[in-house]
Amino acid sequence: MANVICVANHKGGTGKTTTVVNIASYFARQGKRSLIVDMEPQANATLSVGLGPRSFDKTIYQVLLNECSFKEAIKKEIVGNLDIVPANVSLANTDINLANQPNNQFRLKENMQSIVSDYHYIFIDCPPSLNLLVINSFAAANNVLIPTQADYLSLEGLAQMVRSIKLAKQYLNPDLQILGILFCIVDLNQKIERESIELVRKNFVDEAFSTIIKTCVKLKEATSYGLSIFDYAPLSSGAFNYSEAARELEGRCQKLIVNKAREGMTPQGWPDITSAKNESNKL
């Protein structure tokens, strides 16, 4: 059963897509089958792996509308063991077209169940908002990874994000856990960024990653070429940082599985859709 990880932050520009692409690529290079689900209407993850969003007639949007199966939308082995379900701009119509549909918060989860056992890791790249796309992602995931920058506005967004996850856990998906908070695009020469990291680590002792993704121009360049940092600049600081982050993420996933087993829970159990659907409207 896959570790299904929703990578989300209500604030934009925090490194979500870069984190998804590079951590998924790291695991794929380690021989672990990995899948990226692009839930961003701007299709940033799709573009970041070198694919053109306009070239696909079967995307995550068609999956959410039940117009095609999840398997039909998967683009296989874009690099080794890495697959992707692409997105395009049509995904922006999701809220309108699913607003009055039954179980609209669970479309992603329902469709994903057919493939969840085929992968070690599934990463869901979310848009910077709290809309039906993000709610579907919360419902389908086991864990949430929160990439954030080390500045005042990002910390305000982090607090809001944590509240949203708690509500999702209460009303939508009782199995949902915060996997961690990962600082991205960090310049440790700036005092305000060092102080921001210290503040988060003080208030989120268990959640804050020890790994920090430092500012690295090679990460931006890799994205422009549609490559992971490991394919574009494997000896760069960005490659080193994301290798460390991936290993820490794996350890955190294993720890959560052990904790759930001790509590007598199914390691990767998902909540029952029928019992949760009415409560989810409170989000």
Image (spheres, rainbow, N blue to C red):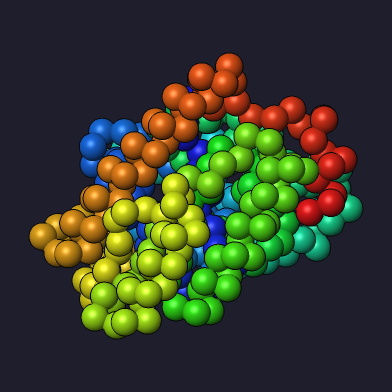
How many numbered badges does the structure rendering display? Answer: 0
Identify the image quadrant of the C terminus.
bottom right
The x and y percentages for residue 164 are: 67, 57
Q: Is residue 5 above or below residue 239?
A: above
> What residue do we see at 67% from left, 49% from top?
166
Q: Is residue 72 visible?
A: no
> What residue do we see at 58% from left, 17% from top?
264
Of 25 and 128, nearer the camera is 128
Relative to 109, is 101 on the left or the right?
Answer: right
> What residue do we see at 80% from left, 35% from top?
276
The x and y percentages for residue 35 are: 43, 42
The x and y percentages for residue 38 are: 52, 55
Image quadrant in which you'd find residue 52: bottom left
Image quadrant in which you'd find residue 41: bottom right
Image quadrant in which you'd find residue 250: top left
Of 261 and 34, nearer the camera is 261
Q: Is residue 191 above or below residue 156?
A: below
Q: Is residue 138 visible?
A: yes
Q: Is residue 99 above or below residue 104?
A: below
